[in-house]
Amino acid sequence: MSKPRDAKFPDKATLLAFIRAHPGKVGTREIAREYGLKNADRAELKRMLRELADGGSIRKSGRRKVSEPATLPPTLLADIVSRDADGELIATPSEWDEQDGDAPKILIHTPRRIKPGTAAGVGDRALLHVEAADSREAGPAYVGRVIRVLERGKARILGIFRALPQGGGRMVPVDKKQAGRELNIAAHDAGGAQDGDLVSVDLIRTRSFGLASGRVKERLGSLASEKAISLIAIHTHDIPQDFSSAAISESEAAQPATLSGREDWRELPLVTIDPPDAKDHDDAVHAAPDPDPNNKGGVILHVAIADVAYYVRPGSALDRDALRRGNSVYFPDRVVPMLPERISNDLCSLKPGQPRGALAVRMVIDAQGRKRSHSFHRVLMRSAAKLSYAQAQAAIDGKPDDVTGPLLETILKPLYDAYAVVKRGRDERDPLDLDLPERKIILKPDGTVDRVIVPERLDAHRLIEEFMILANVAAAEMLEKKALPLIYRVHDEPSVEKVHNLVDFLKTLDLSFAKGGALRPAQFNRILAMVKGEDSEPLVNEVVLRSQAQAEYSSENYGHFGLNLRRYAHFTSPIRRYADLVVHRALIRALDLGDGALPPTETTETLAEVAAQISLTERRAMKAERETVDRLIAHHLADRIGATFQGRVSGVTKAGLFVKLSDTGADGLIPIRSLGDEYYNYDETRHALIGSRSGAMHRLGDVVDVKLVEAAPVAGALRFELIGNANVEFTHRKTARKTKGTSKAKLKTESGKSARAKPGRAKARKAAKPKQKTKSGRGKR
């Protein structure tokens, strides 16, 4: 930053320009120094910064710092939340990472002539075209125009009806934020609800004391059995359950694909490899050595994907229902499919021995694992076998069964040989290599939780994953070559601010992040390799994960940072993802492969709207799936109040510590008020709460013992108390070293580093405990 100069009070545009020019966070001190402001000017400066923050032009964070908010894409889904003083509508993005601070505000301009479907109001969800506002003007950082209103606002509260003996009952909210805030339902307002019903309730009266009152608007289903626990998430997030009668009629009338207009691949021994409980099988693979002498050591891969586009035509009832859903949603007890079972589990499921239509790609791979060429084909195939991951792996490991035995030499070994070749290319590409656990809930027949497991990560999983990635890349390359619009799967590189925060955090562990030039996943991988096997490994993995952007769908290509790929599109799961169906249609159109092609009316602009919508439905599905798991585990633990568990701090906020239990993966909160009788400061850089007197530190990644003190199964909320004292690390190291009489005692921290203690901290040092090593598993990309 430049040296102080004569004071000239900056206007808001100048302040914004300065903040944008310094992406590492700056605060009032740095701004005052830059513009030579005196103490008397500080109040006015703070007022201007507050107005900029209220408008969403900047965001505030800990330690009185400000920064430019994360940028918004030109097309996005937003919730209209309020009106400004002039009556103009104000919106915020429907999906926003809270780690990026408060969501930026969008001022919605209302044109004189309002097109049908674009008249919006507070509470509505709409698709917007967004651009940055004029920085010279006060107010929201963005202005927007409504493209289409997707959902009208709903004034309702969802909850479980609990009947009372005297009539009427109570409504227990399903929202975590409303846990403990029951509503009173009078007998004449119960609407026939029975104990255990999921109900929609209108708030009809509030009181200054006692319970508020509500009226049952709709009975949504019985939750008498935990088998129905996923109904809560389905209704909370408005996930469509029922297909339209027209879509059902179309699916029932559909006929199996024939050889007409297709290549005959029925003799090619393709196999499906899926989880053991999979109901639909939409991808099949085959591999063989390349006989071309110019490609010595190379292989030929075939990946065949169910031809969903043959059955789900653009503009049909099936298509409209599929777009509205966006994707299938997977719960422990059920699946809410994107397409009716007649399509997903029958006509488009690649069942062994049954002829099935498919869109296939043939890829030639060289000995270094790099793709030399590819071609797409519309085929009629016949799967040679349906295998599970464990079944295929067992055969390769020397334990074949009756199904895999005959396939071992001719099909399975060539697949694994091809994977060994493809892996060389993957290793050279060096994608982001985060290794996080994926837990799976195993239910009992009555729908209650039996156990929670972390499935073993096998080479069979990696084989299918890498083959699918290659097929997805081939699809994107083909469509770019043909200059056709498509929906990319994109993953932006981490923002400058998040990288800056990561660098600051790594410094607290005496780790350096190699910067310089373009950002690459390899830079993160080097950090992860440095802490492999160390106590700090889970902590660093978690912080690196949080520094990453979120993958999404887009009609504009900006690459996939995590996979380290320049172009990437989802092609391999059209049964469960609408994006893949669009890519199939585009390939059919590009290569003139017959019926079901992408219509000429679909352009980059129209696909931008589709991409924004299905990105939202993907987030919706992820949230619904996560909340259902939380509720099931809360039910599972509800009768264990007072029990102790070991876990790891998975989140640190000003409100307290979030802890993930080691055995079940359940998340719960330790409120900050329960940590002790001193004030705790939130250190954003260290991801920690630090005691103001003792210096005791509670840090992201710490292994802790906790006691369960409250469980709210309906909301999926758990509350814990910390057992024992905090890890102690003293932050003012330089001061401690310079202070005469400083104790020389050192304490081992979770990161494996040592810190000198401040004078007078003997009690805290005595309370500190060494932490336990854990090993992380693998997470979903």
Image (cartoon, rainbow, N blue to C red):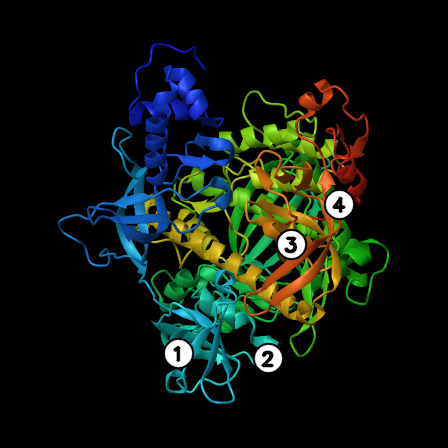
What is the CA distance from the residue labelled 2 to the residue labelled 1? 19 Å
Circle 3 — which element?
A: strand
- Residue type at tag 1: Glu
Q: Residues within 10 Å of mark 3 (few under 14, many from 20)?
A: many
Q: Circle 1 sits in a helix, a strand or a loop, which is it?
A: strand
User: Which image quadrant: the N terminus?
Assistant: top left
Residue wearing tag 1? 218
- The local crowd at label 1, few if under 14, some if 14 to 19, many if 20 or more residues have their Cα within 10 Å, is some
* First of labels 3, 1 by sequence position: 1
> Against 96, is 368 above or below?
above
Amino acid found under the numbered disc labelled 4: Asp
Q: Position of residue 258 (x, y in %)?
A: 50, 67
Position in image of residue 245 (x %, y %): 38, 77
Look at the numbered disc 4 and give the secondary structure of its residue: helix
Please give the residue where the numbered disc 2 appears in the rendered image. 225
Q: Give the Cα separation between the discs numbered 3 and 1.
A: 48 Å
- Cα separation, mark 1 vs mark 4, equals 58 Å
- Where residue 121 appears, x then y in whole percent? 26, 57
Comes first in the chain, label 2 or label 3: 2
Mark earlier in primary sequence (1, 4):
1
Amino acid type shown at disc 2: Ser
Front-lying residue, 609 or 1: 1
In contact (CB < 8 Å): disc 2 and disc 1? no
State left or right for residue 187 relative to residue 499. left
**Residue behind mark 4:** 417
Between label 1 and label 4, give the one nearer the viewer: 1
